[in-house]
Each structure stands twice: as C-alpha cells, then as structure tokens.
Image (cartoon, rainbow, N blue to C red):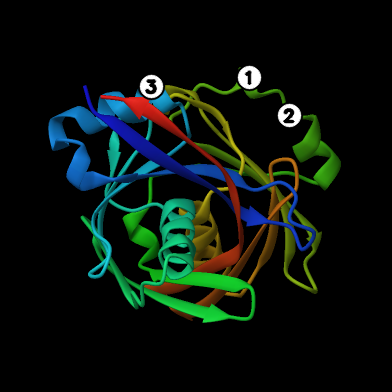
Amino acid sequence: MTTVDVHVVRVFVDPSGAFGNPLGIVDGTLVPVDARLGVAAALGYSETVFIDDPADGVLQIFTPTVEMPFAGHPTVGVAWWLHSQGYDTPVLRVPAGPVPVTRSGDITSVQADPSWGSTFTWRQLESPDEVLAADPASFSDDHTYLWSWISEETGTIRSRMFAPAMGIPEDEATGSAATQLTARLARPLHITQGTGSQLLTTLISPTAVTVGGRVAAAPSHTFNL
C-alpha cells in the first residue's frame, strides 16, 4: 500500500479569497495511469490533476468519470500551485496541446483554443436571478451552461454549469466554458459562476482565449493506493 499526498487548491476565488472550485493535485509518478480514473472518482473533486513532470508541465486531468484533454480550472490551479512550489513552468502540456501560462499580480491565466473544451448546451437567460433560481436536478445533458448579462456594457456575466452525466451535478467554476463563451461573444468577460467564483477572460483570436483568476491553497490530505 502506498500513501499518496493530495494537494488541494481553490481556483477562481473572489478578491477576499472566498468561493472557488476545489482541485485535487497528485504526483502522477506515484499513481499508475490505469489507476488514475479510479483515484479521481474516489477523491470526488470535479477534476483531479496528476502531474507527471512538474518542470515541463506534463499532466493529465480526470473528472470522476472520464479523462479530459483540457480543462480550465485544473490548468489555472496547477499553474498557480507549481509556481508556489518554486517551479518556473511557462507552458503546461495536456493531451489537447500546449497551454501557455501568464501571471499578473494575483491573477494566474492560461491560454487555450476554445475548441478544446467540452461541448456545452448554452442557455442565455433574461436575468441573474433566473440563473440563480435554476434547479440542478432539472438538467440531464452532459454539460448545460446557464448565463445572463449582469451588465452587457461592462462585459459582466452571471452563470452556472451542470454536468450530471459527468458525475458533476454543478460545477463551481468552469474555465473551458468561459473560453468558449468569450469566443462566442468575441469580447473579454468577467464571469461570476456558482456560489461566487470569479473568472476573467481575454480574447486574443478566435482560436486563442485566456482564462484566469485567483487561486488559494486549501488543506491537503492523503489517500492509500
């Protein structure tokens, strides 16, 4: 039996450090590839990352039910965590492709092609109140993204995302969806998702969008393999 550390961060916290989407981070050299999905399911985070080479940024991302070629909150969270551990890793390497990393103050951002993310059912609602009133049990598609303008003038949005088929009844903050919505609307956005997580995006081109935010450390724990 091997005891493995699980480092936990909360990704896309607000300026006070509240909210954020928890992410499990595991040393991939300790977990065989064919065991990673089971570990991710047992841990129960919306995503868990297994880092195979921290200096070169090589990693895999798993939900409780499937491997993801790219996901936003895991790459932002890992980029922040690697930097906190003393690694200068300018590019993360996920199955979808290279993911450049940038930092500005307390904001960590990654750049990705919006097409790398999951396929979403998009539902624009009339008001943030409608978004907040939605019942997660009403949604059965793989990924349903509800959103409304808080202010179209300032590019601020309120959103929620449900993915019950992926083992995620509601995702607190979805970076890949933020990249896709930014490309769809062709403008930078400030998105408040879930209970209050904050995502910031920029549009470089139709195939290059950044998504970023603040990250905070959470208590670590262990599991036995």
Labels 2 & 1 near each other (Cβ < 8 A): yes
In this image, 68 relative to 195: left or right?
left
Q: Nearer the viewer, residue 101 or 52?
A: 52
SS type, badge 3: helix
Q: Which residue is mark 1?
A: 138
**x and y percentages locating residue 24 in the rendered image:** 44, 41
Q: Measured along the vertical axis of the image, is residue 167 above or below residue 106?
A: above
Q: Amino acid at mark 3?
A: Ala
Q: Nearer the viewer, mark 2 or mark 3?
A: 3
Q: Which residue is mark 2?
A: 134
**x and y percentages locating residue 183 in the rendered image:** 49, 67
Label 1 CA crowd tier, 10 Å (few <14, some 14–19, many 20+): few
Question: What is the C-alpha distance between the residues marked 2 and 1?
Answer: 8 Å
SS type, badge 2: loop
Q: Nearer the viewer, mark 1 or mark 3?
A: 3
Label 2 CA crowd tier, 10 Å (few <14, some 14–19, many 20+): few
What residue do we see at 41% from left, 39% from top?
6
Q: Amino acid at mark 1?
A: Ser
The disc at residue 174 is none
Q: Measured along the vertical axis of the image, is residue 7 above or below residue 135?
A: below
Q: Earlier in the sequence, mark 1 or mark 3?
A: 3
Q: Which residue is mark 3?
A: 42
In this image, 152 relative to 220: left or right?
right
Question: What is the C-alpha distance between the residues marked 2 and 3?
Answer: 28 Å
